[in-house]
């Protein structure tokens, strides 16, 4: 059926008829996307095009590129899983040859365009050649990030911490680099790419190559490119060498090669996954330089290997060095006349959620904000974190521009960056501060890799140290946080928040969701942790006993305004405002 349709499309067509598969308009669009890809190596370029007369997932992306860039003078090689004789390869080749009216070839050295799935050929491609890869998954971040919008933002900000966490998780689980196709690489030190069809073995062939590589995904309609002589570097920690796939002692059962990418057969022996190369070796016609081009220097070496247990050794807690005070400043965070008004909906009046809120917090000091539900505590907290836009007033951080810049004026990306090393948050709901789908260690690694940590062992040691300090048993370090109890999740969140020794810590109802006895334990832990370090803390709670346990000074908020301030002890012992008296009475009850 497919064959008949193909014949009608291609072979029964008169010599002078118009191309049948892609019209000129569509070809131009694809070429334009290819050019954009070449201009910004590794950047994913969307394009529009017609559907191809092949099933999605059968190479429609590669087909569109080959048909758009090829012509009658080309010589096209089509391989699928390293083989030219699969149904898919045969049909794509016929469709391409019939449409472009070009020659086809099995010999890589004779081809000007190689359309491939799964492999970069073992033979060397040169400067006149174009490698077209059919991509099964265009977005490298999709494995670790579900939101398309977030993926885009992360590329724009070169924020690839999640990918590093993915690598950390793989190493923590397996002790070695694992995963075949789709290994993440950095292109020209800027864009993350997962050359998803090819094995790790072929990644070195994309680095500083003489040929152009175009990668295309038909269903997503995305193209990206690796132009000649582009740096393509596999992501790896500084102390974990990148390795290619290899089984010790394996050789091709047909040609005897031990320097090609070998696949294991059902019978348990190995074969070259590049059929043409294997034939050449057997015919004694193989290129003698091949061995030098093979990634033999990247074969797994057990002597360099990371052990799964690395970093889980017990160690004593060392408190961070005390006192990071900005020069000439007494405070780490200063809030001045902060205000936020919500516009009313459908004629309802405006809500002044916060007005004229001012305070500052010194290193080593903890300030409480207390009020009943709706008093504006969370609004103030969101303004500090940067989640609330259009706030009035100013927020200064001692470590940002020596306290001279109003961080409310920074753009969202700059404010997000502050949350990595400067200002940490512990949310009421652990799910807001953690990824419940990854391990406890991975969650701490998330913050550390975002801060630029690139040593696997250092990350693991630091995570172990922090988790031990918050009393998460080390044997649970590699367990997924989603399996933890509420109290333990909150402890992991605290460990993550402290990972980079931030100058300011914001605690938003840190114990509200927990059972009373668990909450008491977390409160005790927080009190100890705060006493150990010179960190400025803001604690928001509706519960005076939490404020009493953790803070030195407190603000009492009502209807968005501060109605009373003072030392926490005094407020608790001798509240003046009737509203404060009510809150205190509730806590003492
Ligand atoms: P708290 O955390 O102390 O319970 P909030 O800061 O959440 O108080 O809320 C303060 C006031 O602002 C409340 O009256 C609340 O209804 C209002 N508010 C909070 N968020 C919004 C919003 N997104 N839109 C409109 N009104 C809001
Ligand atoms: Mg609230």
Image (spheres, rainbow, N blue to C red):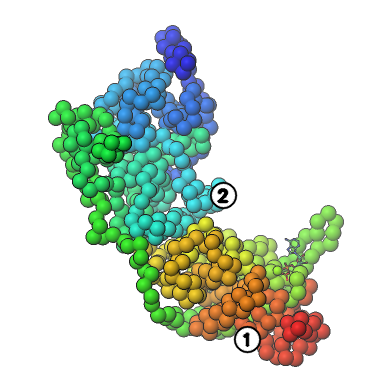
Instruction: Look at 16% across and 27% down and name the residue there.
Output: 283
Using the rendered view, name the quadrant where residue 290 is placed.
top left
Instruction: Look at 44% across and 55% down and name the residue there.
Output: 166
Q: Which one is in front, 87 or 217?
A: 87
Residue 387 visible in this rendered orientation of the protein: yes
Relative height, residue 558 to residue 391 (above, below): below
Relative height, residue 373 to residue 482 (above, below): below
Residue 408's label in the rendered image is: none
The residue where tag 2 is placed is 147
Residue 392 visible in this rendered orientation of the protein: no
Q: Secondary structure at mark 1?
A: loop
The picture places residue 536, in percent across and down from the top left corner, at 56, 79
Instruction: Look at 32% across and 59% down and name the residue there.
Output: 240
Q: Secondary structure at mark 2?
A: loop
The residue where tag 1 is placed is 552
The picture places residue 95, in percent across and down from the top left corner, at 41, 20
Relative height, residue 320 to residue 310 (above, below): below
Quick one: quadrant of the C terminus? bottom right
Q: Which one is in front, 38 or 216?
A: 216
């Amino acid at each position: 059926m497919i064959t008949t349709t193909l014949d009608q499309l291609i072979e029964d067509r008169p010599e002078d008829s118009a191309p049948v598969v892609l019209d000129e308009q569509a070809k131009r669009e694809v070429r334009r996307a290819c050019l954009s890809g070449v201009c910004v190596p590794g950047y994913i370029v969307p394009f529009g095009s017609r559907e191809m007369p092949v099933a999605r997932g059968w190479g429609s992306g590669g087909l569109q590129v080959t048909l758009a860039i090829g012509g009658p003078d080309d010589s096209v090689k089509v391989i699928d899983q390293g083989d030219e004789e699969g149904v898919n390869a045969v049909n794509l080749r016929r469709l391409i040859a019939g449409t472009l009216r070009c020659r086809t070839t099995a010999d890589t050295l004779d081809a000007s365009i190689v359309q491939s799935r799964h492999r970069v050929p073992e033979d060397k491609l040169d400067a006149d050649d174009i490698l077209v890869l059919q991509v099964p998954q265009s977005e490298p971040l999709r494995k670790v990030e579900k939101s398309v919008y977030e993926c885009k933002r992360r590329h724009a900000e070169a924020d690839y911490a999640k990918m590093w966490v993915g690598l950390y998780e793989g190493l923590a689980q397996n002790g070695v680099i694992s995963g075949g196709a789709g290994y993440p690489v950095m292109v020209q030190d800027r864009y993350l790419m997962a050359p998803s069809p090819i094995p790790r073995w072929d990644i070195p062939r994309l680095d500083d190559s003489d040929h152009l590589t175009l990668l295309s995904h038909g269903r997503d309609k995305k193209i990206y490119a690796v132009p000649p002589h582009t740096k393509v570097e596999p992501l790896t920690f500084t102390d974990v060498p990148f390795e290619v796939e290899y089984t010790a002692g394996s050789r091709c059962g047909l040609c005897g090669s031990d320097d090609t990418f070998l696949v294991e057969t059902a019978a348990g022996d190995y074969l070259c996954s590049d059929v043409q190369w294997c034939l050449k070796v057997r015919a004694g016609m193989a290129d003698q330089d091949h061995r030098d081009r093979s990634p033999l220097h990247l074969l797994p070496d057990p002597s360099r290997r990371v052990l799964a247990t690395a970093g889980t050794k017990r160690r004593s807690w060392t408190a961070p060095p005390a006192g990071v005070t900005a020069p000439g400043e007494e405070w780490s965070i200063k809030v001045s006349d902060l205000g936020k008004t919500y516009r009313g909906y459908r004629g309802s009046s405006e809500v002044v959620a916060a007005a004229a809120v001012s305070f500052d917090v010194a290193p080593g000091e903890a300030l409480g904000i207390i009020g009943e539900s709706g008093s504006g505590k969370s609004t103030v907290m969101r303004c500090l974190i940067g989640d609330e836009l259009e706030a009035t007033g100013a927020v200064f951080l001692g470590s940002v521009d020596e306290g001279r810049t109003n961080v409310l004026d920074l753009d969202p990306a700059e404010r997000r960056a502050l949350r990595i090393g400067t200002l940490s948050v512990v949310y009421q709901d652990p799910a807001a501060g953690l990824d419940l789908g990854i391990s406890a260690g991975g969650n701490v690694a998330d913050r550390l890799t975002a801060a630029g940590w690139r040593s696997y062992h250092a990350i693991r040691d630091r995570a172990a140290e922090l988790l031990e300090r918050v009393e998460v048993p080390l044997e649970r370090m590699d367990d997924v946080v989603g399996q933890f109890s509420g109290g333990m999740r909150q402890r992991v969140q605290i460990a993550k928040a402290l990972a980079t020794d931030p100058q300011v810590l914001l605690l938003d109802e840190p114990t509200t969701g927990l059972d009373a006895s668990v909450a008491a334990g977390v409160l005790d832990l927080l009190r100890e942790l705060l006493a150990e370090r010179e960190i400025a803390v803001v604690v928001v709670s509706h519960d005076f006993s939490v404020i009493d346990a953790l803070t030195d000074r407190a603000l009492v908020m009502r209807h968005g305004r501060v109605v009373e301030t003072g030392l926490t002890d005094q407020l608790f012992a001798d509240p003046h405002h009737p509203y404060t008296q009510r809150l205190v009475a509730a806590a003492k009850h």
